[in-house]
Image (spheres, rainbow, N blue to C red):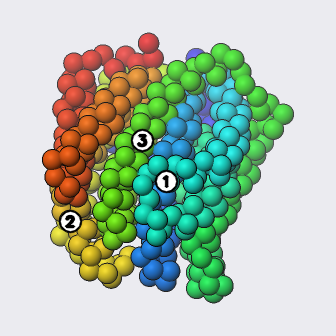
Amino acid sequence: MRSNSHHEAERQGTKDMTSGNPKTLILGFAVPICLSQLFQQLYNTTDSVIVGNYLGKSALAAVSSSGTLIFLLVSFFTGTAMGAGVAISKYFGAGDYDKMSQAIHTNVAFGLIAGVILSVFGVWATPEILRWMDTDPSVLPQSILYFRYYFCGALAIIMYNIFTSIMTAVGDSKRPLYYLIFSSVCNVLLDLLFILGFHFGVESAAVATTISQAVSAVLCLIHLTKKGTVYQISLHKIRFHKEMLQEIIRYGLPTGVQNSVIGFANVIVQTNINSFGENAMAGYGSYTKIEGFAFLPITCFAMALSTFVSQNLGAGKHERAQEGAKFGIIASTSLAEVIGILIFCGAPFLVGLFNHDANVMAYGTLQARTEALFFFLLAFSHCIAGICRGAGKAVVPMLIMFGIWCVFRILYISIAMQISHNIQLIFWAYPITWTISSILYLIYYKKSDWVYGFD
């Protein structure tokens, strides 16, 4: 039964998405997430701009070579946290705050253990993994240095994602935005201080990022431990609740695996890019920062749809969940394609912001003009994955992503590189796999009973 306590929850900064205009609610939830992602992308991009222009293309290549590996190792745990967010949203939508609290404290306990494990493994395994990725010897020492410093702060990175998943699960997408703006400014200032002021090396960019993430995590924790809220974290309650852990694993593990297999496929892509030398590495790294801006409408609508669908299915409002899903898909794909057209047209200028070397610019521009016009397919796939996750059917996107974005993508690249050592064939791996996954998702969306959710 839903009660007045639910309306009190709304006054505490949460958002009930089970009543009101779905379009307005989804947009109101998505816009702060989009702005959060924008600031995060800006400070990630600032890292690369400062490194590329003041430390040179070798340092830029070193930072770029670490990106896919960082995603591979971090994404499993952040994906699992997203699954926990589904459980939190479901119980929030149903007005069951006791189980919601269990889900929150189990999620925090998971994050603490995961952060420590990831720190130790990341620091220890860095050199061998980067050598396995065929990292260019000229940038290997800087890559190792950057990567090890980054993973010293893995606990802060994991806990920040855990805390924001809790807030977004209960419809609060504004506070994560405020905290991220603060940490973004902190990151940029520290980059400038360490690199331009103290003339430190590439490792200082990792230190700046780690400190900034830690600041964000602390700000989130201060808010979440505030007394009197339905989502309050009490330090003495942080532990694993067996039944809730099982539920979180059921929803979250497929998403964690999905993210990891995508990360693994991207590591294979990076390995093949590395074989073309540091110019290709720097160009590829520059383009991925630019592409991050196309992910803004993709990420924010996928997260909004996941929360909207899980809250409404938790409240038994199936038709409303379907109405919101259709709107989110149209909005996300449209915005992603507009950004793709802008990137396609402005690619040389945008890549040149990172490094003015003609070869670096040529590689980055080639990739942009191969992939950018297909961003609507990328958005469609992520939106359907978000809907499935919100409906408690995270296994479906896991299987599609594993089969197409991992296995098929790796097979395609392996065969293509045997036929011709042409870097554009690697770039084409993305539009091809986005197309196939979108077709499969469209079939599933039309034919399945996802709208009934939570089997």
The amino acid on which the numbered mark 1 sits, given as a three-letter code, is Arg
The amino acid on which the numbered mark 3 sits, given as a three-letter code, is Phe
What number of labels is visible?
A: 3
Q: State the residue in front, 39 or 75.
A: 75
The residue that label 1 is drawn on is 131
On screen, residue 109 versus residue 286, left or right, reads right
The residue that label 2 is drawn on is 366
Q: Is residue 192 above or below residue 121?
A: below
For the view shown, which residue lies furthest in the right direction?
236
**In front of the other: label 3 or label 1?**
1
Label 3 or label 2, whichever comes before in sequence order: 3
Residue at the image point whose x is 60% and y is 18% from the top: 246
| Place of residue 46 in the rendered image (x, y in percent of width and height, measured from the top left) | 48, 72
The residue that label 3 is drawn on is 264
| Place of residue 44 in the rendered image (x, y in percent of width and height, measured from the top left) | 48, 65
Residue at the image point whose x is 44% and y is 59% from the top: 135
Q: Is residue 420 above or below residue 313?
A: below
Rounded to the nearest angstrom, the CA distance separating label 2 from label 1 is 27 Å
| Place of residue 130 in the rendered image (x, y in percent of width and height, measured from the top left) | 50, 54
| Tag 3–tag 1 contact (CB < 8 Å) | no
Dot 1, how many residues are within 10 Å of its Cα: few (below 14), some (14-19), or many (20+)? Answer: some
**In front of the other: label 2 or label 1?**
1
Dot 2, how many residues are within 10 Å of its Cα: few (below 14), some (14-19), or many (20+)? Answer: some
Secondary structure category for the residue under label 2 = helix
Rounded to the nearest angstrom, the CA distance separating label 3 from label 2 is 23 Å
Dot 3, how many residues are within 10 Å of its Cα: few (below 14), some (14-19), or many (20+)? Answer: many
Residue at the image point whose x is 63% and y is 58% from the top: 148
